Amino acid sequence: MCSLEQHYSAADIETRILAGIRAAGLDTDRELSPAELGALDHFHTGGLQASRELLVMAKLAAEHQVLDVGAGLAGCARLLAAEVGCRVDCIEMSVDYCTGALLLNRLTGLEERIAVRQGSALEMPYPDNTFDAVWMQNVGMNIAPKQRLYSEIVRVMKPGGRFVFQEVVAGHVPLSYFPLPWATEPAHSHLVNTEELLSVLEGCGLVAERFEDVSDTQLGTNVANSTPAPEGQLGLKIFVDDLAEKAGNARRGLEEGQIRYVRGVFRLC
């Protein structure tokens, strides 16, 4: 997820989003599809393509109750609600992203299937054993206490539920290029390597159904999702500054072995 470095008023957020959508040639007086907004609201490695591939892996059904952790503008939640038909709850730390998510839910006619709550992934306002699946894309690298994060995810999952995720992990070389899409400085980046990630997940009672490193695939190298969109095209410039520099640093980090991209589906025993 791209970091958001400044706070806007709710009115300004809606104005910026609507202006960006209209500048891209989309008519906000009609119901938009989640796919039309993909360049704006899937701000993680691989963009909408990565979300679609993860959706295939997840094997979700319409009757499933899903939680999207660190949902951002809720692009993934809208994809799930529209293509699977399930109900999705979103939790997101940024008030600005929550405001934007609510607007985009209305524009796509999906506000009845998606609930958005502002809050921390480390202390989620849901009862134990609530969700059939928990979805998370490019969030953990911003959170230092990994054990607490994944224990909280497990707490809200039903037995037999799935944890579906995509994540940036540490490579074999120390991270040296900043700012990055998820962190402006080293203090904001909390990467662990693959072995450490798997150890925490397994320690929380999660068993891998599928786990893969996609760094060397087209998906893994597609950090261009974080580059500024050309003028007149929808993109992250509505919210995030210095995207070209951040994307370039992420690309260099990948090429030099400082970061890796992984994804997986784990089941709670």
Image (cartoon, grey):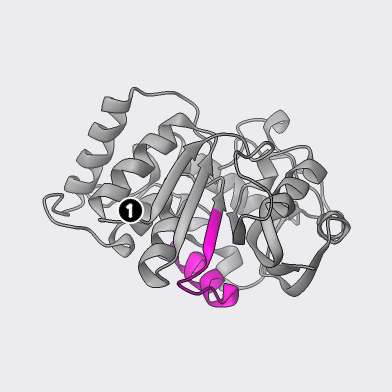
Residue at 64% in and 51% down:
252
When asked about the image quadrant of residue 194, the answer is: bottom right
Quadrant of the snapshot with the C terminus: bottom right
Q: Position of residue 254 (x, y in %)?
A: 67, 56
Residue 63 among magenta residues: yes
Image height of 183 relative to 147, above or below: above
Q: Position of residue 77 (x, y in %)?
A: 44, 57
When asked about the image quadrant of residue 95, the answer is: top left
**Nearer to me, 106 or 33:** 106
Q: Secondary structure at mark 1?
A: loop
**Nearer to me, 148 or 211:** 148
Label 1: few (<14), some (14–19) or many (≥20) C-alpha neighbours in 10 Å:
few
- Can you identify the residue that label 1 sits on? 112
Residue at 46% in and 24% down:
6
What are the residue bounds of the magenta stretch? 48-67
**Nearer to me, 48 or 217:** 48
Q: Position of residue 24 (x, y in %)?
A: 21, 51
Residue at 36% in and 50% down:
40
Q: Is residue 159 left or right of residue 241?
A: right
Residue 132 visible from this viewpoint: yes
How many numbered marks does the figure carry? 1
When asked about the image quadrant of residue 116, the answer is: top left
Residue 14 among magenta residues: no
Q: Position of residue 216 (x, y in %)?
A: 67, 70
Q: Amino acid at mark 1?
A: Glu
Image height of 226 relative to 124, above or below: below
